[in-house]
Amino acid sequence: MPAASAAPLPQTQPGPAIPTPTAHFRHRDPTPTPAPFTLRDILLWCVLPVLIVLGLRLFVFGLYAIPSGSMENTIMPGDRVITTHLSPRPIALRRGDIIVFKDPANWLANEGATHNSDRLIKRLIGLPGDTVECAGGGAPIVINGVPIDESAYLKPGVEPSRSAFSVTVPAGRLFVLGDNRANSADSRAHTNDGAQGLVPVDDVEGVAFVRYWPFNRMGWLSAHHDVFRDVPTRAPTG
């Protein structure tokens, strides 16, 4: 007779897992300790900002006090302005720019300056190649045959020029006028200085773009480039 087979063992169902008891400990953050002020910190927080400010002051921006009333009412005597040294290079000068330049031929002697200075500030009217002229007696300034309307920046009640003149600007020179034409010893007043009252481009130190003092007059200085939008460009001849 066949051998008896073993009966299968009963299968048990797995029960729920019993969690392993663990101890619960309170987590404590480490207390931060102040780091010592190292040489690296001194360079990063003290020396570097000073170098950045000095670099900007020397190579990008200039600060100037206005010594006379030749640019009224755009700029008043005693106002302080910021210029950019990026003009005339690498940014080209444009008609209407308010430029600061070295005194080319003792112009300041006739400016009535309120304090010692060897810099002047005027509005750039004629670029190299331009012919700038005026018939005087209230007639408008004419550049390359195009009369311009300067009412946006001329001091109220002041004529474009009482005196007549006609100047062709050679290469490397600029023709400048003050916004207060009645009290500005500008290019018109120095036609006999050997350079026809023209400013060397190399003597330009920057273009003024903002007034920062006094606080109640703080604001941007407009170049009014739109005044000259119809003036054609002419290449200088010499």
Image (spheres, helix red, strand yellow):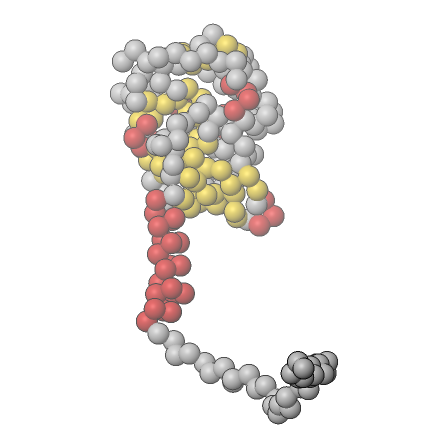
Residue 88 in the image: state x and y as whole percent.
36, 31
Total number of numbered discs in the rendering: 0
Q: Which residue lies furthest to the front in this view?
A: 1
118 above or below 180? below
Q: Relative to 162, is 58 above or below?
A: below
Is residue 103 in view? no
Is residue 8 rendered to the left or right of residue 53? right
The picture quadrant where one finds residue 44 is bottom left
Give the residue drawn at x 34%, y 44%. Answer: 59
In this rendering, is residue 132 above or below 172? above
**Among the 4 quarters of the image, the one containing residue 233:** top left
Specify the farthest residue to the top. Answer: 145
Q: Horizontal and vertical percent for residue 220?
A: 55, 39
Work out which quarter of the rendered image holds the C terminus and state it. top left
Question: Is residue 128 in sight in this rendering?
Answer: yes
- Residue at 38% x, 54% y: name it: 52
Question: What residue is drawn where x is 52% and y is 47%?
Answer: 212
Residue found at x 46% / y 11%: 232
Whether residue 1 is situated above or below residue 127 in the rendered picture: below
Residue 99, percent across and down?
A: 42, 32
Horizontally, is 95 left or right of 216 in the view?
left
Q: Nearer the viewer, residue 235 or 145?
A: 235
Place of residue 216 in the rendered image (x, y in percent of width and height, measured from the top left)? 61, 48
The answer to which image quadrant residue 118 occupies is top left
Image quadrant in which the N terminus is located? bottom right
198 or 171, which is in the foreground?
A: 171
In this rendered view, identify the residue nearer to me: 161 or 80: 80
